[in-house]
Image (cartoon, rainbow, N blue to C red):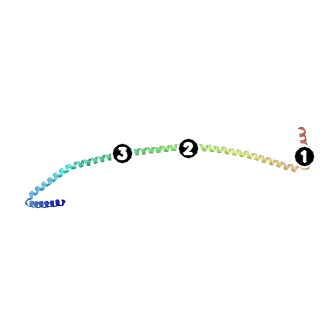
């Protein structure tokens, strides 16, 4: 069916072409010019009608899309400016907070340094007292040891002197005196 329609269209087109050739030969140049202007006017009017029918809707839709995009862009810009202002405010407050933390840290360090100094002074005082007690204890021990050593030396010296002066007669006399003293004490009791 398509082939038949195509053949028919070609035949009609060929016949029309033959007739138009015959007409062209018969027409004068002025008539052609009138027809050319008529065709031009028809095309312009048809194109104008077509454009006036479809272009306003197209441009209206395009304008509304552009307006919508502009509004979205403005909303995004406003949101970005708001976020930027918030970030600037945070940064400004962050600097103040950092300074506050620094001041607090300095104050805490000063308090801690004072506490450490006080503890150190107490420890030094305690160590000094312990050292004094140890020195005093060592001194009294040394004094006792020295006294004991001096007593021992004096006993040893006294023993040496007694042995050098003591002979057998003196020894017998001392023993007799000692036994007499014991007897006297025994009789008194």
Determine the CA span between mark 1 and mark 2: 81 Å
Side of 126 relative to 24 (left or right): right
59, 142: nearer the viewer: 59
Quick one: quadrant of the N terminus?
A: bottom left
Q: Residue furthest front?
A: 1
Examine the rendered structure and indicate whether residue 1 appears above or below residue 187: below
Tell me if label 1 and label 2 are in contact, CB under 8 Å. no
Question: Viewer-nearest of labels 3 and 2?
Answer: 3
Instruction: Name the mark on residue 79.
Output: 3
Residue at 58% over, 44% down = 117
Quick one: label 1 or label 2, which is nearer the N terminus? Answer: 2
Of 1 and 186, nearer the camera is 1
Relative image position of residue 187 (x, y in whole percent) = 90, 39
Looking at the image, residue 35 sits to the left or right of residue 118; the answer is left
* Marks 3,1: beta carbons within 8 A: no
Q: Which residue is mark 1?
A: 175
Residue beneath the point at 18% across and 50% down: 49
Crowding at label 2, few (<14), some or many (≥20) Cα neighbours within 10 Å?
few
Work out how far the residue at label 3 is from the one at label 2, CA to CA, in angstroms: 47 Å
Which quarter shows the C terminus?
A: top right
Kindly state the secondary structure of the residue where label 3 is placed: helix
Looking at the image, residue 10 sits to the left or right of residue 119; the answer is: left
């Amino acid at each position: 069916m398509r082939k038949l329609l195509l053949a028919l269209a070609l035949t009609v087109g060929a016949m029309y072409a033959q007739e138009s050739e015959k007409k062209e030969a018969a027409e004068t140049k002025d008539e052609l010019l009138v027809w050319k202007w008529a065709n031009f006017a028809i095309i312009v009017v048809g194109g104008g009608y077509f454009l006036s029918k479809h272009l306003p809707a197209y441009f209206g839709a395009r304008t509304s899309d552009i307006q919508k995009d502009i509004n979205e862009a403005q909303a995004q810009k406003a949101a970005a400016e708001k976020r930027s202002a918030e970030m600037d405010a945070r940064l400004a407050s962050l600097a103040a907070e950092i300074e506050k933390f620094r001041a607090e840290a300095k104050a805490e360090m000063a308090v801690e340094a004072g506490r450490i100094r006080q503890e150190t002074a107490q420890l030094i005082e305690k160590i000094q007292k312990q050292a004094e007690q140890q020195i005093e204890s060592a001194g009294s021990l040394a004094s006792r040891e020295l006294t004991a050593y001096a007593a021992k030396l004096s006993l040893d010296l006294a023993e040496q002197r007694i042995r050098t002066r003591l002979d057998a007669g003196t020894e017998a006399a001392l023993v007799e005196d000692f036994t007499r003293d014991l007897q006297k004490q025994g009789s008194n009791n």
